[in-house]
Image: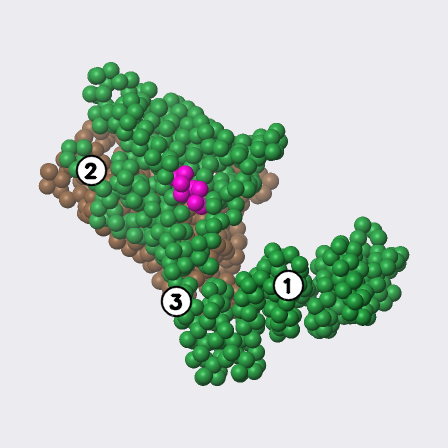
Amino acid sequence: MKTTILSVQGWLAVFAALLVMAVVVPVLNLVVPDGSVFHLSDFYVSLLGKILCYAICALAMDLIWGYTGILSLGHGLFFALGGYAMGMYLMRQIGRDGQYKSDMPDFMVFLNWKEFPAAWAFSDSFVMQMLFVLLVPGLLAFVFGFFAFRSRIKGVYFSIITQALTFAAMLLFFRNETGFGGNNGFTDFKRILDVPITTPSMRVLLCVVSGLVLIGFFVMARAIVQSKFGRVLQAIRDAETRVMFTGYNPVAYKLSIWTLSAVMCGVAGALYVPQVGIINPGEMSPAASIEIAIWAAVGGRATLIGPIVGAFFVNGAKSWFTVAFPEFWLFFLGALFIAVTLFLPNGLVGLVNRPGGIVGLFKRKTEKHT
Amino acid sequence: MKWLQGLLGGLFLAGVSAALALTPDQALRIAQGESDARIAALNEVVVAADPALAAYVQALLADEVKVAGGKALIVRDGKATDAATGASSPLPDGAEDVVNPNRVRRELESALAALKLFSPNRAERAKAVTELKDQADEGKLVLIEKAEKTETDAEIKAQLALLKAAVLISSADRTKRLAAAQLLADSDQPATKSLLIERVAAETDSEVKAALSKTLSTVAGRLAWGERFGVLFTGISLGSILLLAALGLAITYGLMGVINMAHGELIMIGAYATYLVQNLFKQWTPGAFDWYIVAAIPFSFVASALVGALMERTVIRWLYGRPLETLLATWGISLILMQSVRTLFGAQNVGVENPSWLSGGVQVLPNLVLPYNRLAILAFAALVLLGMALLIGKTRLGLFVRGVTQNRRMAACVGVNTARVDTYAFALGAGIAGLAGCALSQVGNVGPDLGQGYIVDSFMVVVLGGVGQIAGTVYAGLGLGVLNKLLEGWQGAVLAKIMVLAFIVIFIQKRPQGLFALKGRSAE
């Protein structure tokens, strides 16, 4: 059984996306003059960058929920942890430009701390903090997943304890004593790698990097779900007991994809923080994690393009609604939750996902083999 | 002079505002100048224990005093009277308001309390002693001793003695401190304990320190039981609230298997229903306001049950057997419900007043007061539990619910309308959530976010207790409440909450089916 990662058309689409992200977006924003119809305003660049990070989360959620059948209500925690690891580095980069002109971040001066807590030991090194972006969410997910999957916690139980996990972490991060800025979190970033962070070119650069990372993760996810490993994951989703009786150990499979998914969220968080300029414990609230699930569900689970579409659709709608009808955003979001679960079990992509449709490009090759 | 003072004091007590004992110069010095000088002037006058001073101090506290032309004037309703002579005087144009910095204000308050020690009203004297407990200093010592001599009520007299000791314990005189340490051993007040702890740490003289430590252990020993019972009671009280919040979920999730993320919002609807009933009573029958809660109980049940029935008919019905989808759809419902309440009632918290018979509490031990509203919730939780057990265990509807839960197809075969039973059961669970909301409105804030705070907790209780086990829910609710309060005393509220969540996560690792796992065929 030999499967290709993507069809020829699929690869073409990926390269087109690469081209858009790496060339078209920067050119439209930086080169095309302000008054032109083709000019992409700064507002849309930062919105695009933000949504690209959300799309990475949705993709990660799809791997664990859409393909393995495990609904996590705690992915916001991994996202926030990646964001905090990045935020710590950015806080150190402020240097003495803070309110109190001290080497310490403002909130530590405010709390009258004289030296950095242990967790901040490597916070001035970009390389170490980037390592933490991967390691902290990864390790937490690994340890938590190891115990949870080993005790065969499944379905709704798993969802609820992941929710408890992120809720507990939120309470913990709300405390000033935890050492991560309490309620206010980190904000007021000035520089990244000693380069000012608020310039237009840096904004475009971060947006482009997010886009490239998303495309990279997409191809990786595609490779995973096409592999034998990915097939076992889908088998676990459909009939876990049968997989066990055929001689596979689901724990190892579930644990690997769970950890990978958490790491992807951590990376998304790290890309998100420099673009929006703030990270606080609100990102760990149960509601934030549930929203990630709804992006994946709206777009269409178990199709890799679906979650990306969902993230763009829901967040695009959000940024439009919160400006045009702020009162109605929650009504819309709530109705979307209900409508998608009742009427669109395959999501938006399911509407067009038929042979010859847009997603057929990605689907046709594999269906012959299954 | 004495008879004149007595006469004027009598006049004051009769409600006539006159203050001759206070010289105009003194009145001015209290109202004007540096804070330190004002406090000194105040203390100088206070020792005379002249009740006439009280009116002046009261006016100062109410910001009714103005200074003009070297005189302190009390200005009330646009009419000015001289603070010292009581004679009415015209209000000059350039009158300046007297501003009281916080420190002066505190001194004024404690002076007022000290003056009230001589009030003919027993309740007022008792109140004054309590007020002085936190703010007495050596300046008031003369007054306290004087009051102790004239006091006739034995209870207040004993409290005054304690108060005196509490003041003396920080005296500069070593023998006075030693005597105070002995005196305080009779105390059963929590405040004495914290005072003693503070003094033991600050004391330099070894003999006094030993005496203080000995007194401290006596007092602490006396207080220990009250504290233990206090923790236990707040724990059980929190447990009863958790239990109420989780009981509805024990039906919808435990028996029916519906993951209802809108459960918290059903609780919120019950609380808002209570708020509506309260407003109706306030407007139409203010005389019977105290009994609004009796009408609110059925109303909140019906309100939430109707919303629940509607939810079941329109959304949840189509998602049976798909728990994860149910979770997302009900989360959507919760968002809509929350935003609806925000639109209807505003995003701010609304005020729900306790009926008068639910405020206050019963004093069991000196440091243990059981508030009536907490006791009422405890009783209410027990009643709801009993009612629910009877309904599920003894009625025809309960039989149907159990039948449909255990074997849906067989129940349908013998003629049970399973779809209708589902709606009834869900509405019942929702209605019980409404009852919880009614109870919660009596102890906490009522706002659109009320439910969010309880949703995680309620699920934890049901999951910990074991799905489908109402007895398990009871043990889990009370257990978590007590555990939470025990940890809270040790590590503070936030860490306690985190530890409880961590405990539950670990517990579920060990026993994935909860405290009371189903055995046999119905177990998965």
Q: CA distance from mark 1 to mark 3?
A: 30 Å
Q: Quadrant of residue B524?
A: top left
Task: Pick whichever of labels 2 and 3 is earlier in the sequence.
Answer: 3
Report the span colored magenta. B374-381
How crowded is the residue under tag 2: few (<14 C-alpha within 10 Å), some, or many (20+)? some
**In the image, what residue type sits under mark 1?**
Leu
Q: Chain of mark 1?
A: B
The three-letter amino acid code for the residue at tag 3 is: Gly
Q: What residue does disc 3 label? A: B221
Residue B117's disc is 1
Reply yes or no: does residue A143 show up in magenta. no
Residue position for label 2: B518
- Residue at 44% x, 78% y is B211
Chain B: what color? Answer: green
| Crowd band around label 3 with a 10 angstrom C-alpha radius: few (<14), some (14–19), many (20+) | few
Query: Which of B121 and B482 lies nearest the eye of the viewer?
Result: B121
Give the residue drawn at x 79%, y 53%: B76
Assess whether residue B377 is covered by the magenta stretch.
Answer: yes
- Spatial CA distance of label 1 from label 2 is 65 Å
* Point 29% across, 35% down: residue: B254
